[in-house]
Image (tube, helix red, strand yellow):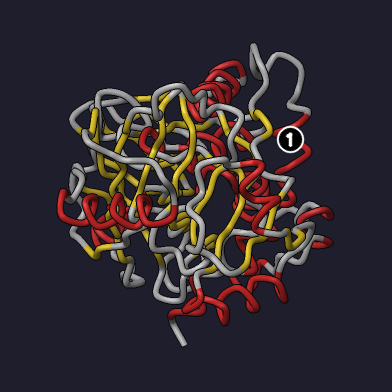
Amino acid sequence: MAQDFDIVVIGAGIAGASAAAHLAETRKVLVLDMEERPGFHSTGRSAAAFEPNYGPAPIRALTRAARDFYESPPPGFASSPLVTPRETIFLAPSDQTSAFDRLMREQQGMREISLAAARAKYPLLRDGYAVRAVLDPGTADIDVDLLHHGYLRLLKSRGGRLACNAGVTACGRVDGRWSVETPAGTYRAPVLVNAAGAWGDRVAKLAGAKPIGLQPKRRSMAVVAAPAGHDPMPWPLIGDVGETWYSKPQSGKLLVSPADATLVDPHDAYADDMLLAEGIDRFQQATTIEVTHVEHSWGGLRSFAPDGNPVCGYDPEVDGFFWLVGQGGYGIQTAPALSRLAAALVAKAPVPRDILDGGCDPAGLSPGRFHK
């Protein structure tokens, strides 16, 4: 027997979990995930940084609208702080000054600092690598697991359900309701939310909607030891403005990434060893840190719409089919704001004022932009 809900959400990563938690306040909501645990792919492999000056304009607006939530979450949402302040320094070698100028034109709250000041904050910067540096004092580390599980707990406390090992095998719309078939059962609802990440276009095809051209892109990460005699935890996140590498302290070690964005098919991503080696080499050119051993590496998927902006809204051609995909590498930092926007649009309620005032235009995120 099929089970009936008001809304079925496909995907229990941060996008689906956070939107579903808001929707469950007034609707009967089910979240389906194809894995045995939620957040297995992109959500569980994030670099976990809050960077309000990172990404295209809609992403920056959503990130800034998320700050209040991160700094003051609702009572009982989390057992410890969701964010820990960590400054960011972006460096510009001589061939990246144009990118540096562009960043400075678009930024909010950043300030250019001397190379000596940058070295005071990150003592192992190499002399001669950069010609300019900029500091963002408003960035932070995000506790992704705490955030994700906070939304899942909120979902359940409001009567929402989560079903894992429930990948969608078929779905169709009959008499104004979606019928969604999975190994865990068949479920029906008037509204189907596609928060399937890299698999979003595949879900759309099952539902009879036109794919939007999602582009899953792999990012590789390495964990390396901190240099002997140094505690890296007070250091900022550093990287180049051209986005060819970055490094972040974590758990007494250093994360290093080549900031790669390699187009791939949806899959259980793994690190590209060659690209990791190139990123580590760039990191060593920028610092005096010698990396002799990679302790651990992994890959994650960052899925982009063709124009690089998220997709959030009802499909203009398929009744009751709502898109919530294409967050790129920004899904964690934007989740508290994007989830509220998605919940409002799903319910056809007014968009939260702070999101509009922050400069995010929901029309610019609509899937209708790909149907013109």
* Percent of width and height locating residue 58: 63, 65
Q: Where is residue 140, by image quadrant?
A: top right
* Percent of width and height locating residue 330: 51, 52
Residue 372 versus residue 96 in the image, above or below: below
The residue at the point 43 percent across, 55 percent down is 286
Residue 265 versus residue 3 in the image, above or below: below
Quadrant for the N terminus, please.
top left
Q: Tell me if mark 1 has few (under 14), some (14-19) or many (20+) residues whose alpha carbon lies within 10 angstroms of its own.
A: few
The residue at the point 19 percent across, 42 percent down is 268
Q: Is residue 295 left or right of residue 226?
A: left
Q: Is residue 300 left or right of residue 82?
A: left
The residue at the point 84 percent across, 55 percent down is 353
Dot 1 amino acid type? Phe
Residue 106 versus residue 348 in the image, above or below: below
Residue 172 in view of the camera = no
Q: Is residue 133 left or right of residue 248?
A: right
The residue at the point 22 percent across, 36 percent down is 292
* Percent of width and height locating residue 83: 65, 30
Most distant residue in the front direction: 127
Tell me the residue that label 1 is attached to: 69
Q: Secondary structure at mark 1?
A: helix
* Percent of width and height locating residue 241: 53, 66
Q: Where is residue 80, by image quadrant?
A: top right
